[in-house]
Image (cartoon, rainbow, N blue to C red):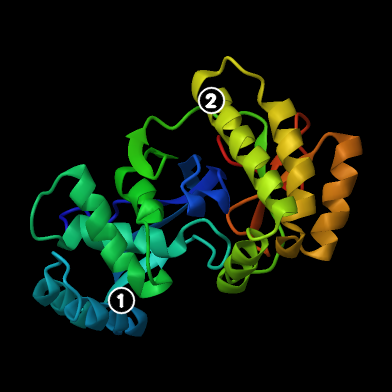
Amino acid sequence: MSNNPYTFFFAKILLVGEYLVLNGSAALAIPLSQYFGYWDFNDKMDLELQLLCEFLEKTNTDIDIIRLKQDIDKGLTFISTIPRGYGVGSSGALVAAIYNDYKTNKVSDKLVQTGLSKIESYYHGNSSGIDPMVSYFNTGVLINNSTIEKITAPKIKNIYLYDSTRPRTTDKLVNEFHKRQTSIKYKLAFEELANLNEELISAFLTGNIKVQPIWRKISEIQIEVFDFAIPEDIKYKWLRSFDNGEYFKLCGAGGGGFFLVHSENKNNDLIPISK
């Protein structure tokens, strides 16, 4: 492990591009500094970390397994404030921490992404490596035409998290999305969303375009085509938002965890994503 045991690995949010990123559409992910994880030691073995280590031992990764196992035997554990099942990269932060402190060689950014995705496959099967990449570099990540590049995370105003108070699992939600892609009705809506996502990313990155009207259009479409990913109580708030100016949007897969809200009037139910 590094000499500084309190290096923080932050959570992430997919600010733009939910679901459509699976088809190679544009997406933007940024660090979320309110939630983080770090290494520490305690007086008992971390069984979850031990299982991950056993997986890595059988996987072709450039992780120093011997040193990792030695530290796990000494009580290595990952202390995390990142809520699980909320779409903010709880596993990604742990993956970033392992790669940061136990990789065997210094590699290029492209190979970093490959190394991170191999480790994260323990949690998500075939992984893009985007979540741990945000945590590892502590920077924004832009995905466009299936290419991934680091960028300076844009300054975010009037964007908040809304806590649905329930975790979620993504497999069934992603399967439902893939089913809907076969319908002409949904295909046309997804194409419109892909264009709006590009506009929204440009608005965030350049600051020359107003975010709110694009965000509202996305909100209006998402509640129609991603209704399967929006719990009933959130749908009620979502529909009301068109009257009170608090526009909801999915945060990743939806279904639970956090949702994103654009609002020019902060209220106590909303958690700011920037300080």
**Residue at x 22% of width, y 55% of height:** 100
Picture coordinates of residue 26 (x, y %)?
Answer: 49, 39
Q: Is residue 37 visible?
A: yes
Report which residue position mark 2 lands on.
Answer: 202
Q: Which residue is mark 1?
A: 42
Using the rendered view, name the quadrant where residue 216 is placed: top right
Q: Position of residue 72 (x, y in %)?
A: 22, 78
Say which amino acid is labelled 2. Answer: Ser
Q: Position of residue 57 (x, y in %)?
A: 17, 79
Q: In the visual, does 261 lie left or right of 197?
A: right
Q: Determine the residue positioned at 55% across, 18% down.
A: 207
**101 with respect to 162 (left or right):** left
- Write the residue at 88% across / 55% down: 236
Between disc 1 and disc 2, the foreground one is 2
Q: Earlier in the sequence, mark 1 or mark 2?
A: 1
User: Which residue: 35% across, 42% down?
Assistant: 148
Residue closest to the far front: 184
Please, what is the three-letter code of the amino acid marked with disc 1?
Asn
Q: Is residue 225 left or right of residue 236?
A: left
- Tally of numbered tags: 2
Q: Which corner quadrant of the image does residue 120 belong to?
A: bottom left
